[in-house]
């Protein structure tokens, strides 16, 4: 009888330790999430700028894994010609390597990030040099990428791209 009681006390003690550890982990996650929510607009702008640059590099490398981590599940891209692409469309294209990129880079000094609470918009001039279906492309366009803050961090939810710009002259700033 004493052994049974001792075993019951040990089990209760183990359960209590497990519960305390769980509470501490939840508290740590809440503190981390609160710190992200308390970021200044300048810190948010830097984080989103870096994330958008990381996304452009992932597109250039056809890195579907990184693209998947950044894109929201309900992501939509609208091009200057009116084509609409989903997250699944972009990931499928990257996995199949439908486009080979030599360049998919923001022109230095053109990136601008605007933050309004849990929403951020990135605008930049993008230079694209690629081959798709045997056809070379070399052009610049303006884009706007919209990010929202989620419990797991910033996610890219909507993109819109201009038509390719004329080759002559310098492009206007947005």
Image (tube, rainbow, N blue to C red):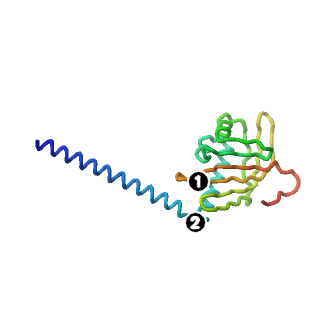
Along the horizontal axis of the image, is 40 left or right of 132? left
Query: Which residue, as the protein is rendered here, is positioned at the far left?
Result: 1
Q: Is label 2 in a helix, a strand or a loop? A: loop
**Residue at horizontal 52 percent and vertical 53 percent from the top:** 151
- Looking at the image, tell me whether mark 2 or mark 1 is earlier in sequence order: 2
Picture coordinates of residue 7, whole percent (x, y)? 18, 43
> What is the CA distance from the residue labelled 2 to the residue labelled 1?
14 Å
Q: Which residue sits at x=79%, y=34%? A: 134
- Contact, CB < 8 Å: mark 2 with mark 1? no
How dense is the environment of label 1, judged by Cα within 10 Å: few (below 14), some, or many (20 and up)?
A: many
Q: Is 3 on the left-hand or right-hand side of 126?
A: left
Q: Residue at position x 34%, y 52% from top?
A: 21
Q: Which corner quadrant of the image does residue 108 belong to?
A: bottom right
How far from the left and from the top, in percent, is residue 1?
11, 41
Q: In which quadrant of the rendered view does residue 97 lie?
A: top right
- In the picture, which quadrant includes the C terminus? bottom right
User: Mark 2: few, some, or many residues within 10 Å (few <14, many ≥20)?
Assistant: few
Q: Which residue is mark 1?
A: 154
Along the viewing direction, whichever of 110 and 23 lies nearer the viewer: 23
Count of numbered circles in the view: 2
On residue 40, the disc is: 2
């Amino acid at each position: 009888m004493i052994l049974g009681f001792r075993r019951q006390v040990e089990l209760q003690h183990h359960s209590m330790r497990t519960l305390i550890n769980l509470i501490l982990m939840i508290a740590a996650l809440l503190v981390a999430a609160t710190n992200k929510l308390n970021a200044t607009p300048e810190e948010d702008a830097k984080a989103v700028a870096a994330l958008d640059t990381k996304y452009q590099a992932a597109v250039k490398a056809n890195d579907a894994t990184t693209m998947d981590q950044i894109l929201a599940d309900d992501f939509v891209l609208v091009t200057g010609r009116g084509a609409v692409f989903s997250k699944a469309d972009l990931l499928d294209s990257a996995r199949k390597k439908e486009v080979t990129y030599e360049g998919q880079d923001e022109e230095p000094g053109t990136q601008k990030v605007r933050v309004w609470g849990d929403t951020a918009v990135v605008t930049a001039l993008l230079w694209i040099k690629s081959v798709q279906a045997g056809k070379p492309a070399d052009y610049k366009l303006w884009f706007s990428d919209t990010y929202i803050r989620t419990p797991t961090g910033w996610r890219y939810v909507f993109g819109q791209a201009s038509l390719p710009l004329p080759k002559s002259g310098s492009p206007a700033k947005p």
